[in-house]
Image (spheres, rainbow, N blue to C red):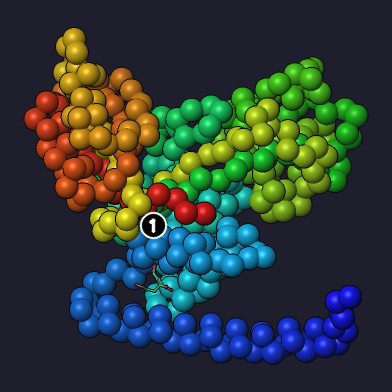
Amino acid sequence: MEQLESLDELRQRIDQIDTELLGLISARARCAQQVARVKLSDDANAVFYRPEREAQVLRRIMALNPGPLAAEEMARLFREVMSACLALERPIQVAYLGPEGTFTQQAALKHFGDSASTQPMPSIDDVFREVEAGAVNYGVVPVENSTEGVVNHTLDTFIGSALKICGEVVLRIHHHLMVGQNTQRQKISRIYSHPQSLAQCRKWLDAHYPMAERVAVSSNAEAARLVKTEWHSAAIAGDMAARRYGLEIIAEKIEDRPDNSTRFLIISTDDVPPCGNDKTSLVVAMRNQPGALHALIEPFQRHGIDMTRLETRPSRTGVWNYVFFIDLKGHREDPVVAAALEEVQLRAAELKVLGSYPVGVL
Ligand SMILES: O=C(O)C(=O)C[C@]1(C(=O)O)C=C[C@@H](O)C=C1
């Protein structure tokens, strides 16, 4: 029979291992400080955050992970180590669609780690403006939900902006019904949430609160803020909002689809070099004529490029008759992608590459 070590012995071993980890993490942090010096000696306006390198580091860790911790769990730990190392090089500022406690803030922290400084903005336009003005380094905005589809406003804003997409992050969205201390639970007559969240919980609400008024507000966090002072209201929001506003969750995971997730984009002024597993997002305007869509897709098919999304939006200007938002596998610098883009450019009224960036790792 296996001889179990005593609790004391095991704890001594854990202490030893922690001492080693401490030394190793500190050595890694010193390395990052040296990286910062090298970057600055190459270029006074050096970019410290390198999404392509971070994606490679995380993927390598996941591939090497021997267990018993799950690869994703291990990557999350390294995510935080890298976040702290980057903050030593240069603290970074990230604007997100607020207020505090939104899923977008959760996405920002998942992507950049807890050492990033995050700042809530009142609207998607404000996130774009802050990044454009250089007041922050990066922005995070929602772009599509697996149940409710695209966030049109984000796509439309890209058309008139010079900002680039430098990353993506996908978040599993769990909605909870939450109330304040003074809420009389039997008398809930109003439920606040963002319109997309109300839609994502439609069936649950029909079954459990068919008579309650559903009130759409600008964000889930705003819904949570509102119920705090009302005795007959509840909010649908996420964990962060419940924590931020001190609300009690009375029904967990009420989203109609268990795989409900939202994709967020990271925006910045910089282009990202290839990391080996990239995506490219573009917006293409075609003239309003028969066969336009086929002409657009054909070069991608012929070059064997995998299109992962195609979204049509009505144009807001004369030139942009039909506007297509396209995501494809590969980086704009990959020879096949570059060749296909060149061909599409000839057929389109306008083509704009919104960015090439690493496929989300976490
Ligand atoms: O490799 C770099 O360029 C670094 O700055 C180091 C490091 C890391 O800690 O591994 C930190 C921040 C960057 O975003 C990428 C990686």
Under mark 1, the amino acid is Tyr
Q: Residue furthest front?
A: 1
Q: Quadrant of the N terminus?
A: bottom right
Instruction: Estimate the x, y position of residue 186 in percent, counting from the top left.
Output: 90, 29
Instruction: Estimate the x, y position of residue 55 in percent, counting from the top left.
Output: 41, 60
Foreground residue among 10 and 241: 10
Quarter residue 161 falls in: top left
Quarter residue 48 falls in: bottom left
Residue at the image point whose x is 43% and y is 73% from the top: 86
Residue 176 shown left or right of residue 9 in the figure: left
Residue at the image point whose x is 74% and y is 87% from the top: 13
Residue at the image point whose x is 79% and y is 43% from the top: 249
Above or below, 167 relative to 204: below
Q: Which residue is mark 1?
A: 138
Foreground residue among 7 and 126: 7
Above or below, 152 relative to 87: above
Residue 354 shown left or right of residue 189 in the figure: left
Q: Is residue 338 visible?
A: yes
Q: Quadrant of ligand 1?
A: bottom left
Dot 1 falls on a residue whose secondary structure is strand
Instruction: Estimate the x, y position of residue 154 in percent, counting from the top left.
Output: 39, 36
Residue at the image point whose x is 89% and y is 35% from the top: 184
